[in-house]
Amino acid sequence: MKSNISSRLIYFVMSLIIIFSFVGCAKNYVTDIQLTESPEAPSAIITPASDSLESAAVDNNDINRLDDINKLDQVISVNEVKLTEFYYEEYSTGAENLDLPEAIDNKFNYKIIYKSGDYEVAGYISAPADYLEKKYPILIYNRGGHHYLGKMSPGQLCLLADMGFIAIATQYRGIDDGTGEDEFGGADVQHVISLIDIAEQLPFGNGKIYMMGESRGGLETYCALKEENLAGKDRISAAVVSSGVSDLTKIYNVRELGMKDVLKLYVGGTPEQVPEEYEKRSAVCWPELINTPLLICHGKTDDRAPVEQAEIIFDMLKEHDKDVELMLYDGGHGFSPESFKYAFEWLSSH
């Protein structure tokens, strides 16, 4: 009798495993279609930086180093990140393309988990090695892609620190120990806003907070600037959008079936089914709500976000007398070395 019960229990457990495996595979079929290509990579090596203490409200005078930021109410944990061979190669290749000296030991890198509403969100922060002796501007970087595809890596953030910034980035919700599901510019825009809240409290900044977004991150940047304006805040000194999405409905209409499936999954349907969701993610529907000085960079031969995504929003912003500049360059999707360098020069002038 006992043997018969054990057999039934084993059969029941194995059935559950098979069912959940099937559900997971069905869901991942769609989420594995990417907007921004990124190779599979091993995880970075993460070591405890300050015992990953539970966060508690604290005056920022108690924050003496970056690994103290878990004392902020919004930050749950902060852990130092050592680059694996993969991420070091990614960093050194980027540095070479940008004519930057390799200085991997010349900065501090941390993975953070922070609160944003009811969610816990993963991100990274990187700073030049002398950030305790010299004040640096803070740069919030909004990545492209969706879910795990196109996710931030510590190697990427190192390059931003090399450009003379304390750089902080979100993975959006649902990955790398984060909770919730991606919404592709929906409520997850609040995760970007939460980084502004954190940046405001860092005692290492020089008073300037900038924002930069690429591809889907450009969409997030537009939306974050709108939310700041609606909240009556003026915390972002200037922003850069590269290869950004300003009209999500047009992106849906011109992209391949795979990308249409991604948008239907994360936005909640087609533009015909949920037009209000596409409109609230599309800056062309509310250009009057963007007041931050803005640089728009875009490749002329971009086949993922056609160049008209930049040209149309630029024209609309100019019509509303906004402080905006457009830089078009020869190339496809993503920053070119020329536009990347110019973007940082432009930010530093604001």
Image (spheres, rainbow, N blue to C red):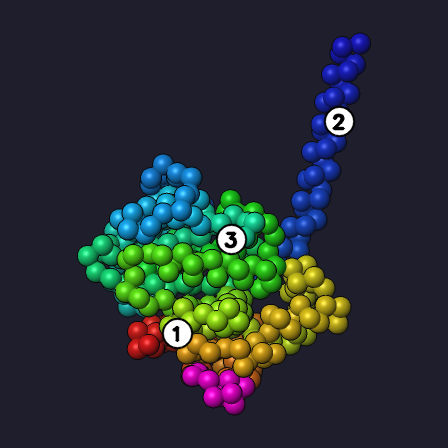
Task: Kindly report the distance in space between the C-alpha atoms of the residues bearing marks 3 and 1.
Answer: 23 Å
The secondary structure type at the circle numbered 2 is helix
The residue lying toward the viewer, choosing from 77 and 3, is 77
Q: Position of residue 303 (x, y in %)?
A: 56, 74
Q: Which residue is mark 1?
A: 238
Local packing at callout 1 (Cα closer than 10 Å; few below 14, some 14-19, many 20+) is many
Q: Amino acid at mark 1?
A: Ala
Relative to 302, 203 lies left or right = left
Residue at (44, 50) in percent of width and height: 74
The secondary structure type at the circle numbered 1 is strand
Q: Position of residue 123 (x, y in %)?
A: 44, 52
The boundaries of the magenta stretch are 316-324
First reached walking from the N terminus: tag 2 or tag 3: 2
Q: Is residue 11 above or below residue 342?
A: above
Residue at (54, 86) in percent of width and height: 316
First reached walking from the N terminus: tag 1 or tag 2: 2
User: Disc 3 or disc 1, which is closer to the eye?
Assistant: 3
Residue 350 seen from this side: yes
User: Disc 1 or disc 2, which is closer to the eye?
Assistant: 1
Task: Kindly report the distance in space between the C-alpha atoms of the residues bearing marks 2 and 3.
Answer: 38 Å
Task: Kindly report the distance in space between the C-alpha atoms of the residues bearing marks 1 and 2.
Answer: 57 Å
Q: How many marks?
A: 3
Local packing at callout 2 (Cα closer than 10 Å; few below 14, some 14-19, many 20+) is few
Residue 13 sits in quarter: top right
3 and 1 marks in contact (CB < 8 Å): no
Residue at (49, 55) in percent of width and height: 171
Was residue 235 drawn as part of the magenta stretch in this picture? no
Q: Is residue 128 above or below residue 346?
A: above
Q: Position of residue 305 (x, y in %)?
A: 56, 74
Q: Which residue is mark 3?
A: 116
Find residue 12 and name its label: 2
Q: Amino acid at mark 3?
A: Ser
